[in-house]
Amino acid sequence: MHEAASPLSRTPAVSARSRVLPLLLVATPVLLALWLVIWPAAEAVILTFLVPGEGGTEVWSTANYARFFGDSYSVNNFTNTLWTTAVTTTILLVIGLPLAIYLRFAKGQLPATVQSLVMFPMFVPSIIVAYAFIRTLGPNGTVDIFLHAVGLPRMRTPYLTPWGPVIGLVWDGLPLTVLLLLSGLGNVTRPAVDAARDVGAGWLAILVYIILPRMRSSLLVTLSFNVLGIFSSFTLPYLLGPAAPEMMGPFMQRTFGDLQDVGMARTQAVITFAVCLLFGALYVWSIAKGRTKSAAGGKS
Amino acid sequence: MSLLSISPPTPSLLTRLLRRTGGADWFGLLAFIFLASTIILPLVVVGIWAFAEVWRYPAVLPQRFGLGFWGEMLARRDVWAALTTSLELSFTVTALSMLICLPAAYAFGRMEFPFRNTLFLSFLTLRAFPKFGLLIVIATIFLNLGLVGTFAGVVLIQLVDTLMYMVWIPAAAFQSVDRRLEEAAQDAGATPLQVFWHVTLPQSLPTIAAAVILTFVGTFYETEGAWLIGAPTVTTMPILMISFINNQLVIQYGAVLSLMLWVPSFVALMFARRVLGGDAIARGLGG
Amino acid sequence: MARLDLDLLGKSFGDTTAVAGVSLNVGDGELVSLLGPSGSGKSTVLRMIGGFERPSSGRVLIDGVDVTHVPPERRPTGMVFQSHALWSHMTVFGNVSFGLRLRRVPREEIAKRVEATLELVGLAGYGERLPNQLSGGQQQRVALARSLVLEPKILLLDEPFASLDQHLRERLRDEVRDIQKRLGITALFVTHGQDEALALADRIVVMRDGRIEQVGQPGDIYAAPRTAFVAGFIGAMNMLEGAITDGRILAGGLHLAAAGSGPAHLAIRPEDIEITDSGEDGHVTVRRMIDFGSHVVIDSSLADGSHLRLQTTKGVRVGEGERLGVRVRHYMVFAEALRDPIRYRGAGVDMLPNMELNYA
């Protein structure tokens, strides 16, 4: 039947197939993401506002959150996480931005070597980072050995203090921070900087008026990406941080795994969502905007 | 940019660097020294520990070198079991990820369909949530489904983690294949399937291979999901490592394990990065 | 207002020499063009004058003051970049006023000066636009205004019209020339287009491989190129390979008087060849006739197969395969023994009156 149909009558069938086929091809990963990201997140938000009421019914309530914020231990963990995130992100930007600017505009053997060094942590799993940290900065570590060799007292080790996770996370986060900043610096051309110098701008004026304004979206992405990553980091805080106050990652894990308090763990997770919501939205927004702009420009 | 050129700063390297820059690049030199001592030195320390049979504080170098702990590690049943589990997991997750993501990537890269852009961007939500919080809420769901503590549960949670890389990077690769190459093949009489097999796929293969390697290595070292969903029945290499670090029984165990695991993955990642370049990775993350 | 002197200026990147000891004196209010193929070092010279490259050797003097080690932000030079390099996040006003704001010039004066400069470049009223709302030509005018508003002693232009189409380029270069003359500003202009150099410059500096090949007024360089390279680079030129023996050069089947000996190039401008007659015993065979309206160019082949271009007045008609007799009015001979020295120059009718062609 279909073989006998005229080309004209076949055309709609073909175009219908060509519309459905791609949707079928993308269906599995999209559905998987829906099932394992969107749905759990949405469900968790709703469930945390429900508490058992009389007669086996569930009632709307903020009791879970009251419990979390009423508990000084939880609040300490929460503020400790905020502190770690702020400090780590600041340090990453303070180290990463000059490095990225240097790598963008310098030429030669030395910048290439520096770039290799900056990218190196990307190839080191965080578990090995943690181990190397302990052996270097931990008690009786390499730094202590050096200090002893030159006759100085031992240092106060950051291992198992709030500074432990900060150092580990900075180490771990530097490559991507520099990469993201570098990709933003791609918008700043050498002639644009030269032209600014030509009209009399010093390095500070160039940074403030020429470079930073053009990097706004990449700074946002870098900031969001780091905040999202650090706020819910687990391995490094778990291995390098203090037992109390701990960061939200290990705290949630303990609540879920050791205390088996599923409801509380869910509440803690939703609280991390809420804090990261702003940054997550910023992240998606600036990328979506960038994609639309480049699509409009005819490039992908 | 060759990462293999990295070595501890020797005088000859330093003088060469200085000469190339005319001695004026003080920032670069400072950055080099800072990064070399903070990034390379700790890893060198791990390397020394792996071959130290006796190293008592405060000696600058070990009292005795040797391969003794390597033999001990290789004889441990739990090491082999964790390695097997990790490899099984990585292969399963990577294969599944390829199976579901590559066709989707092709569709995103080469086809027009409704909601294309929205669906494509929807994968960003995977990164817009703080990962560990998300893992916790997934775990609460898996708890009800009886997936906690099972191999399948770990596979699922690690699979989600791979989606964005395995869709975005190959989609860009398919998209960047020059249409004219395909049209030329069509012109020469190739059917659509032949065009795909002989032109589109080979052209995008290096990038896809790099994405697959990133997925495999990433899964191998994935710690949080495996820890949360797999514990206590599914023990992967990183989880074994954590227990070695936490229990601190023998310092060298951690060092030997680090070195054993890291060297092959480093080579694989180097290859992936050579193909992709930093820019592609940054773009894969939306930079 | 300002003189510019380059004293044995050199620049090398690693092992490669980009500029090898260039010396040049530019007078007050003069517009000098640096002309050469890409890689000739002309842009590097300009960037060294602007302070963007640190010279490996030599000095840059502005009004006799050594500025070799002064950074660009403190040099009295203004540069217009090839890619115009406008700051796309600032308005036209923002771009032009940036340098004045850095110098903490009072607001009212900034407004006045920016307005005057925008009017000078023909962009009055465009202050609030963003660069990407402007056409390519307008963007380049903004870049020019941005440099001029600071009243630099020396204006540097680095292939400023390279990204514009032919029509716009010609219009803009006339405007730049007008503005430069009106302000009496000393200017250096880098280009690889000979038309641009011939049309704009008071003097042309032809560069090649980091060295100056020749400096002179446009007409002189065209009429009397000092080297075979300059001869081939400026204007259309027939370059025939040959050899000098017994006071004559034999090249491409042509046989002409020349001094010296050894391998040499015979250089003849298309308009210096005159058609004498048509017939079977002619010297050249017509391959193609190209009618430009204002003149006619004939592409012909010589006895040994090499090409010879002739330019003649409009209205001339010849057919393909037709044989023509020709007469050479001017020609030059460049011997190869040294690096392009002149061995001989046929200085026209006086020295070689209506030289007849002889076959070897």
Image (cartoon, rainbow, N blue to C red):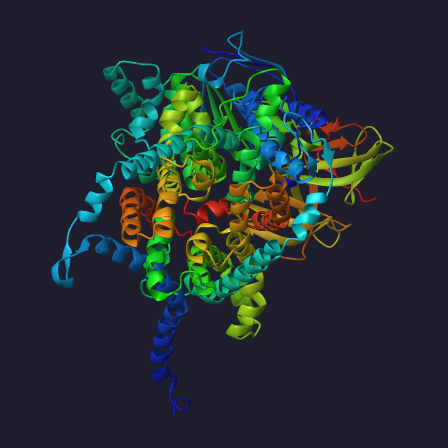
C290 in relation to A13, above or below:
above
B145 in relation to C54, above or below:
below
Where is the C terminus of chain C found, in terms of image quarters? top right
C23 in relation to B2, above or below:
above
Q: Residue at x 39, y 42 (%)?
A: A225
Q: How many marks?
A: 0
Tell me where residue C47 appears, x and y as whole percent.
53, 24
Residue B1, visible in the rendered structure:
no
Left or right of C31 in this view: B1? right
Would you identify the image quadrant in which residue C329 lies? top right
Residue toward you, C145 or B151? B151
A155 in relation to C173, above or below:
above
Q: Residue at x 28, y 42 (%)?
A: A275
Left or right of A71 in this view: C346? right
Q: Residue furthest right?
A: C246
Tell me where residue B47 appears, x and y as whole percent.
65, 38
Tell me where residue C277 appears, x and y as whole percent.
67, 48
Residue toward you, B113 or A63? A63
Where is the N terminus of chain C found, in terms of image quarters? top left
Tell me where residue A142 appears, x and y as whole percent.
60, 28
Residue B279, visible in the rendered structure:
yes
Residue toward you, A107 or C51? A107
Would you identify the image quadrant in which residue B35 lies? top right
Residue toward you, C118 or A161? A161
Q: Residue at x 62, y 16 (%)?
A: A150
Q: Residue at x 34, y 34 (%)?
A: A80
Q: Residue furthest left?
A: A54
Q: Residue furthest top?
A: C64
